[in-house]
Image (cartoon, grey):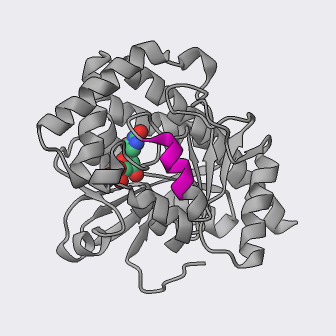
């Protein structure tokens, strides 16, 4: 399964048994823990997400870099350590090798989690939001490496769309250019993280985990590289109206510009600022949508396992 036999992977005990028994596995990222949510909600959410996946008969594999190894599945105490390490490195494709070589603690972004999941033979990964094309990218050139990873690594990523801190039309254009299937789950429009509807048509729509799993396996049969982005709308009760979230986004973007925030710091800065400005409202929604994505991720992973054994 592992595409590189030399990759320094360390599997948790439950992931080892899941691999042996072909139990469905759902990968989870760790940057959402270290850079996406404040303590202690980051820790509580990480554990709840894992519990949600186990409750659906799948096994969670939270991924992070520690002591020269990529950990595929973390113990409770490792998650605890990570949640309390504010200076953990934020790892994307560019910094995975250096962090492993030097032995630092690193949290994996969507891009790095996809790489690690694929090395571990895991097909499905659930998270909150992906990185994308930032507003003003025509001058800043700030486009997340997540988009290029989706174009080259065959993992299906379940997210609630992308945050409106990004330029969503440009994000969809780049994904289209890169040949990434963007599949809205159960609706025609692309969801925008805190709201179910970005006001943009999604390129593709599917209504069942069965179909998403079949499309994932079909891409492999065709020899297509790259993954799928499954855009799963936030549950209605947790939606935040645009009128409430937009002023926080505008303020956060202005603050980032005034403080000269650039490169990898942009997204964590904006997320933290929006949490402050909405006094936790954004966080409640964020937690609800991550749990919702974990449930869909487990359903897709289960379907992939079923269809592979059929
Ligand atoms: N968007 C969110 N929450 C997050 C992130 C993005 O709504 O936690 C994190 C993810 O780990 C994502 C990364 O992969 O930020 C993207 O960072 P950048 O924009 O620097 O590529
Ligand atoms: Mn960036």
Residue at horizontal 48 percent and vertical 34 percent from the top: 48
Q: How many marks?
A: 0
> Residue 210: x percent and y percent?
81, 50
Q: Is residue 151 left or right of residue 253?
A: right
> Residue 109: x percent and y percent?
38, 55
Q: Is residue 304 left or right of residue 108?
A: right
> Residue 261: x percent and y percent?
17, 44
> Quadrant where the N terminus lies?
bottom right
Foreground: 288 or 177? Answer: 177
Extreme residue toward the front, this view: 138
First to last magenta residue range: 167-174
Residue at horizontal 48 percent and vertical 86 percent from the top: 5
Q: Is residue 218 left or right of residue 277?
A: right
Residue 113 in the image: above or below residue 261: below
> Residue 144: x percent and y percent?
38, 55
Foreground: 277 or 66? Answer: 277
Residue at horizontal 36 percent and vertical 42 percent from the top: 135
């Amino acid at each position: 399964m592992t595409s590189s036999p030399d990759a320094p992977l360390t599997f948790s005990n439950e992931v080892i048994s899941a691999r042996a028994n072909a139990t469905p596995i759902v990968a989870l990222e760790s940057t959402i823990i270290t850079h996406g949510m404040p303590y202690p909600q980051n820790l509580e959410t990480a554990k709840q997400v894992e519990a949600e996946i186990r409750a659906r008969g799948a096994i969670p594999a939270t991924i992070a870099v520690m002591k020269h190894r990529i950990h595929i599945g973390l113990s409770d105490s490792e998650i605890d350590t990570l949640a309390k390490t504010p200076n953990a490195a934020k790892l994307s494709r560019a910094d995975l090798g250096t962090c492993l070589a030097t032995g630092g603690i690193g949290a994996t972004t969507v891009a790095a989690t996809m790489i690690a999941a694929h090395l571990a033979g895991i097909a499905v990964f659930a998270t909150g939001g992906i990185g994308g094309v930032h507003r003003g990218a025509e001058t800043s050139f700030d486009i997340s490496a997540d988009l290029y990873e989706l174009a080259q690594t065959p993992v299906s990523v379940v997210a609630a769309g992308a945050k409106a801190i990004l330029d969503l039309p440009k994000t969809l254009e780049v994904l289209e250019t890169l040949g990434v299937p963007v599949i809205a789950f159960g609706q025609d429009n692309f969801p925008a993280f805190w709201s179910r509807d970005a006001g943009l048509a999604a390129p593709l729509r599917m209504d069942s985990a069965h179909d998403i799993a079949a499309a994932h396996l079909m891409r492999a049969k065709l020899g297509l590289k790259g993954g799928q982005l499954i855009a799963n709308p936030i549950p209605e009760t947790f939606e935040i109206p645009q009128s409430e979230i937009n002023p926080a986004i505008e303020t956060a973007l202005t603050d980032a510009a005034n403080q000269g925030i650039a490169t990898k710091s942009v997204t964590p800065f904006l997320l933290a600022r929006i949490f402050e400005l909405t006094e936790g409202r954004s966080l409640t929604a964020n937690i609800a949508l991550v749990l919702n994505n974990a449930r869909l991720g487990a359903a897709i992973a289960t379907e992939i396992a079923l269809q592979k054994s059929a």
